[in-house]
Image (tube, rainbow, N blue to C red):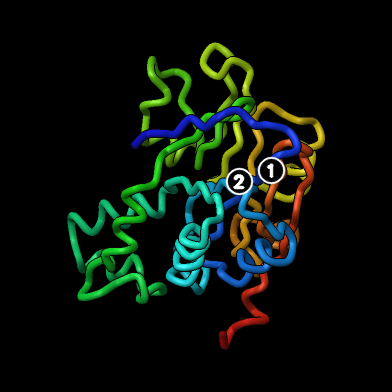
Amino acid sequence: MFYQILKPYKPNKYRRFVIGDIHGCYHSFKKMIEKKIVPTKKDKIFLLGDYINKGPHSAKTVDYILNLISEGYRIYPLRGNHEDTVLRTEEESPEILSWLLKDSPDLLENKRLKPKYRDFFKSLPYYYELDKFFIVHAGFNFKKEEPFKDKISMLWRRKFDNDYNFTGGKTIIHGHQPENIEQILESINKKSDVIGLDNGVCYIKNHKIYDYRRMGNLLALNIDTFELFIQKNNEEKNKSK
């Protein structure tokens, strides 16, 4: 499945949120859902992919997503490059897969992905098209003749411009590329035609590239009101859980 086109938004019927890269930060994600957003089962929540790796609780994060879906919440998850990578690696080398998921052993069983995780990752689409938005993990390569079929770019693309010839002026919302909170807030306040929502939730200590003082948050954007919900990384406070 490449994508899913959803029915047009009907005002006052429900809210729509997009949540950035979670990266195994289960407690932060759970708090965002249960304390900040507090969704009803009519609301729609789009997830930008990369649910695993980096953070301490990859399996718990995916289990929580699956539980929300099974309980009837309208969750629309995308495929991230990390999910795609483990699927590809499993096909090539169980040993490399074990190394890749050394911090997430709960995803594995006999050096392979547990079936429920494999099935979930394989089911994930590459993008969603809504009435006024395209939602994608990384981005699009509009230099290609058919950018919406370019899986690699949708998983890995960085620093791209919107091309209205392809998007019809719809806003692109993406994750994948960590940005500092000021950049993200500026793009939201300006209602830019490309908005990134990855604030590097795992970056809470000194980093060779990113300024952790401007990172370390999980973000959720109400795409109809442009209200931004910010949840600080909550994993250190829940180390034993």
Q: Nearer the viewer, residue 88 or 65?
A: 65
Q: 158 or 61, which is in the foreground?
A: 61
Disc assigned to residue 14: 1
Residue pictured at 36% horizontal, 55% vertical = 120
**Does 25 sit left or right of 100 as displayed?**
right
- Does 96 appear above or below 44? below
Is there any visible trace of residue 179 in the rendered image? yes
Residue ranking furthest to the right: 189
Disc 2 marks which amino acid? Lys
Vertical relation: 45 (above or below) 118: above
The answer, for residue 54, to whether it is visible in the render is no
Residue under circle 2? 44
Q: Residues within 10 Å of mark 2 (few under 14, many from 20)?
A: some
131 or 32, which is in the foreground?
A: 131
Query: Which numbered mark, 1 or 2, is in the foreground of this view?
Result: 1
> Which amino acid does the dot numbered 1 rest on?
Tyr
Residue 210 on image: x %, y %: 64, 55
Q: Report how far apart the C-alphas of labels 1 and 2 lie in the structure.
A: 7 Å
Q: Position of residue 166 (x, y in %)?
A: 51, 16
